[in-house]
């Protein structure tokens, strides 16, 4: 498939890159220059809309200089009881967020977009619903000591593939959606476009 356009991942996320690599997809990474904090300011909409908006900005900004190459943008937003959460800036904020999530169900909104020539051609958004158990303050402190600043890389302050799984009593949703890149619909679209082998 030498005539297949190159795939570009417009994300600095090591997890998203790992997912594509593990799936045997050939791509390169080009980090989008957009300022996410600025893009979120004044945004009116729900978690699905915000995640799609951010993913679109990423893919379109990189694809503007990438010709007909397929540029993948992705973003994930967390909502809990009507509030939007960002990645914690420090461990104190991570602790406060975890205490807000305990005993509650939060939603991860994971959006993926594909753009070419500066325009989004496709998008998909999926949700996962995760219920944290009503753990003790002591458990939170033990968890944060064990995991450390890794929690700052995740909007939910956890990685399910590690000790973070112990925070939960119920998980509903696709594994790839939880990790921030809904692979199955993305691959289906790319195959239809001839960008992946059929």
Image: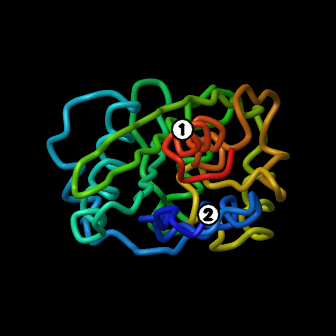
Residue that appears at 80% across and 62% down = 142
Q: Residues within 10 Å of mark 2 (few under 14, many from 20)?
A: few
Q: Residues within 10 Å of mark 1 (few under 14, many from 20)?
A: few
Residue 170 image label: none
SS assignment at label 2: loop
Residue that appears at 69% across and 44% down = 198
C-alpha span from label 1 to label 2: 14 Å
Residue at far left of view: 42
The colour scheme used here is rainbow
Residue that appears at 32% across and 38% down = 50
Q: Position of residue 22 (x, y in %)?
A: 76, 63
Residue 1 image label: 2
Q: Position of residue 122 (x, y in %)?
A: 38, 38
User: Between 4 and 72, which is closer to the camera in this rendering?
Assistant: 4
Nearer the camera: disc 1 or disc 2: 2
Q: How many marks?
A: 2
User: Between 94 and 13, which is closer to the camera in this rendering?
Assistant: 13
Which residue, given by chain and number where applicable, does mark 1 sit on? 192
SS assignment at label 1: helix
* Residue 91, placed above or below residue 85: below
Q: Position of residue 134 (x, y in %)?
A: 75, 32
Considering only order in the chain, which callout, 2 or 1, is on the residue closer to the N terminus? 2
* Residue 133, placed above or below residue 195: above
Residue that appears at 73% across and 25% down = 172
Query: Are the residues at dot 1 and dot 2 in contact (C-beta closer than 8 Å)?
Result: no
Q: Position of residue 152 (x, y in %)?
A: 56, 66
Quarter of the image for the N terminus: give it.
bottom right
Residue 32 image-quadrant placement? bottom left
């Amino acid at each position: 498939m030498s005539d297949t356009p190159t795939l570009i991942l417009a994300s600095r996320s090591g997890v998203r890159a790992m997912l594509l690599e593990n799936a045997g997809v050939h791509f390169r990474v080009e980090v989008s220059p957009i300022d996410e904090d600025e893009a979120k300011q004044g945004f009116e909409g729900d978690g699905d809309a915000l995640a799609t908006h951010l993913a679109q900005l990423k893919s379109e900004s990189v694809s503007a200089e990438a010709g007909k190459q397929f540029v993948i943008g992705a973003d994930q937003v967390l909502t809990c009881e009507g509030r939007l959460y960002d990645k914690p800036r420090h461990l104190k904020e991570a602790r406060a967020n975890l205490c807000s999530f305990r005993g509650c169900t939060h939603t991860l909104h994971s959006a993926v977009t594909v753009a070419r020539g500066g325009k989004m051609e496709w998008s998909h958004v999926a949700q996962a619903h995760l219920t944290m158990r009503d753990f003790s303050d002591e458990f939170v402190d033990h968890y944060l000591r064990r995991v450390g600043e890794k929690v700052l890389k995740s909007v939910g302050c956890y990685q399910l593939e590690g000790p973070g799984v112990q925070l939960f009593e119920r998980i509903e949703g696709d594994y790839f959606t939880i990790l921030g890149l809904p692979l199955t619909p993305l691959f289906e679209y790319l195959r239809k476009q001839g960008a992946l082998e059929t």
